[in-house]
């Protein structure tokens, strides 16, 4: 029997349109080793590691008349050179040029007739560096059974681990008649499936995911939160098909210093920094900012449970909160305390269940941190929260791809409907890296906001050291 997409994964395909492509992205910067790091080396590395992620040779096949959810099938015409591509910047390529390329790559939808991923080797960066840019559809990545391709090409040493050689032969694709017969058999076993799949065919995402019955328990509290609309502002507008991308770099030790002085978690510090940056960005635009001004963020906390310091992964759980960021507060330390109090109150009161219920009701579930942020896209998003902020704790040791040391890694979180900005944060090897994905028309100053992230941390650390 073919591997059928879950209702939640299928909803990503149903919800996608040119304004809201549903793929996650990543930008990894590598220092070129003496032996070089070119397209052929990346192509060979990915080909060697593909047996670790069989989903990357599979495509989505629709069931006739949408009698059941789509299935994953081997792509008999799989062409690795289609998925692994080569690009270059005019030497010496600047960060601004790389960000512009990333924005254009992320603006385009993936081809649904092929496996739903792409990787680009970007050559020509200044200081002897190269970048690997990845795009992977949210229907594919669950973080465990099908991780992002970047995870499998990285090693903990400069000497690549040896992968087992396997001869891949695609399984025959099922015929349309087979898919219909299997769908009918499932309907006989679970009659409710047919009605649900008819709704899905009409792109009724809310009906598609009503099967997630564990969300119903949190529905009442979720609706209580939703009854208090998110503040209006420049972050919530009709968005276009084109994007801008900007990045910010900070150091993990500075967040640790803030935590030692004022308690809370690393994530609290990150959210306080985001709050300060958004405050300064609003002021730079001439927006009205009062002491009570807030911006509501959907905040998935971690794909793994963490210890009391918010750093060491210790379990396998995800919590997502709706947090009103105190952008009206001018004092950075008070902003930090506001955020810490809000996050602590969520954890103690069970408000996270309400936020998770909202995500599930809209057609999403939380298998990974960055993917959870992307899955918040829905017709409700403009009313419930203003933007998504995801923060994924990463490895604090250097990683390598075919001997090339990864220097930095930046996430690209897709935009939700009517939301002009998403912020992804990843810590790696002592750094905390921000990726800002923004609508091209609504946020021509995305790079200004990125600079304000770094300034906001400086302001917070300065206040702490006084």
Image: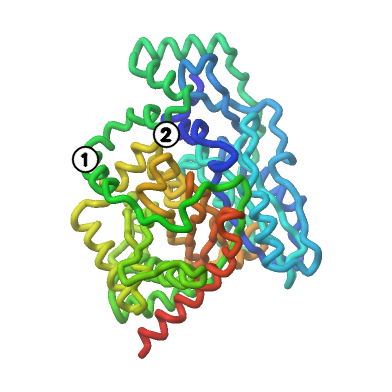
In front: 337, or 385?
385
- Which residue lies at the image location 61% right of the left edge and 59% below the top edge? 28
- Which residue lies at the image location 32% right of the left edge and 68% below the top edge? 265
Compared across the picture, whether 213 is left or right of 99 comes to left
In front: 313, or 285?
285
Can you give x and y, in whole percent of width and height, for residue 139 in the image?
50, 37
Element under disc 2 = helix
Can you give x and y, in whole percent of width and height, for residue 348 in the image?
19, 58
User: Considering only order in the chain, which callout, 2 or 1, is on the residue closer to the N terminus?
Assistant: 2
Confirm whether residue 162 shows in the render. Answer: no
In front: 67, or 407?
67
What residue occupies the far left of the structure in this picture? 349
In this view, 329 is above or below 225: below
Tally of numbered discs: 2
Can you give x and y, in whole percent of width and height, for residue 316 in the image?
34, 49
Q: Quadrant of the C terminus?
A: bottom left
Residue 291 image-quadrant placement: bottom left
As measured in the structure, the alpha-carbon distance from the residue carrying label 1 to the one carrying label 2 is 21 Å
Q: Which mark is residue 429?
A: none
| Mark 2, residue position | 8
Compared across the picture, whether 144 is left or right of 151 comes to left
What residue occupies the far bottom of the structure in this picture? 466
Confirm whether residue 410 shows in the render. Answer: yes
Can you give x and y, in whole percent of width and height, for residue 280 in the image?
46, 73
- Which residue lies at the image location 43% right of the left edge and 70% below the top edge? 279
In this view, 462 is above or below 303: below
Between tags 1 and 2, which lies in front?
1
| Mark 1, residue position | 220
Element under disc 1 = helix
- Which residue lies at the image location 43% right of the left edge and 78% below the top edge? 254
């Amino acid at each position: 029997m073919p591997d059928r997409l879950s209702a939640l994964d299928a909803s990503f395909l149903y919800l996608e349109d040119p304004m809201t492509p549903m793929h996650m992205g990543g930008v990894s910067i590598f220092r070129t080793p003496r032996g070089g790091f070119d397209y052929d080396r990346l192509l060979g590395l990915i080909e060697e590691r593909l047996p670790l992620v069989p989903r990357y040779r599979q495509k989505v096949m629709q069931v006739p008349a949408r009698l059941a959810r789509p299935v994953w099938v081997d792509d008999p015409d799989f062409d690795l050179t289609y998925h692994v591509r080569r690009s270059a910047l005019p030497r010496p390529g600047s960060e601004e040029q790389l960000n512009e390329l990333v924005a254009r790559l992320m603006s385009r939808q993936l081809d649904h007739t092929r496996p739903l991923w792409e990787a680009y080797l970007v050559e020509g960066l200044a200081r002897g560096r190269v970048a690997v840019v990845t795009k992977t559809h949210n229907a594919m990545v669950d973080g465990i059974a099908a991780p992002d391709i970047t995870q499998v090409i990285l090693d903990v040493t400069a000497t690549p681990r040896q992968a087992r050689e396997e001869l891949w032969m695609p399984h025959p694709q099922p015929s349309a008649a087979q898919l219909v017969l299997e769908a009918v058999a499932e309907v006989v076993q679970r009659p409710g499936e047919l009605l649900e799949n008819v709704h899905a065919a009409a792109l009724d995402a809310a009906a598609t995911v009503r099967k997630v019955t564990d969300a119903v328990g949190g529905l009442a509290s979720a609706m209580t939160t939703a009854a208090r609309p998110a503040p209006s502002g420049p972050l919530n507008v009709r968005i276009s098909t084109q994007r801008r991308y900007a990045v910010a770099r900070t150091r993990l030790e500075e967040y640790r210093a803030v935590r030692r002085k004022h308690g809370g978690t690393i994530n609290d510090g990150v959210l306080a920094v985001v709050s300060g940056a958004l405050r300064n960005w609003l002021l730079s635009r001439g927006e009205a900012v009062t002491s009570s001004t807030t911006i509501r963020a959907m905040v998935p906390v971690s794909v793994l449970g963490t210890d009391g310091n918010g750093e060491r992964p210790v379990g396998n759980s995800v919590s997502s909160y709706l947090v009103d960021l105190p952008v009206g507060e001018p004092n950075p330390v008070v902003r930090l305390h506001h955020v810490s109090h809000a996050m602590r109150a969520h954890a103690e009161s069970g408000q996270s269940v309400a936020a998770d219920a909202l995500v599930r009701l809209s057609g999403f579930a939380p298998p990974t941190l960055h993917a959870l942020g992307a899955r918040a896209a829905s017709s409700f998003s403009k009313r419930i929260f203003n933007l998504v902020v995801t923060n994924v704790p990463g490895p604090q040791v250097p990683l390598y791809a075919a001997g090339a040391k990864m220097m930095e890694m930046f996430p690209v979180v897709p935009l939700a409907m009517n939301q002009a900005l998403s912020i992804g944060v990843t810590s790696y090897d002592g750094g905390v890296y921000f990726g800002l994905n923004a609508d091209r028309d609504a946020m021509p100053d995305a790079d200004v906001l990125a600079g304000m992230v770094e300034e906001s941390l400086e302001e917070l650390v300065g206040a702490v050291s006084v």
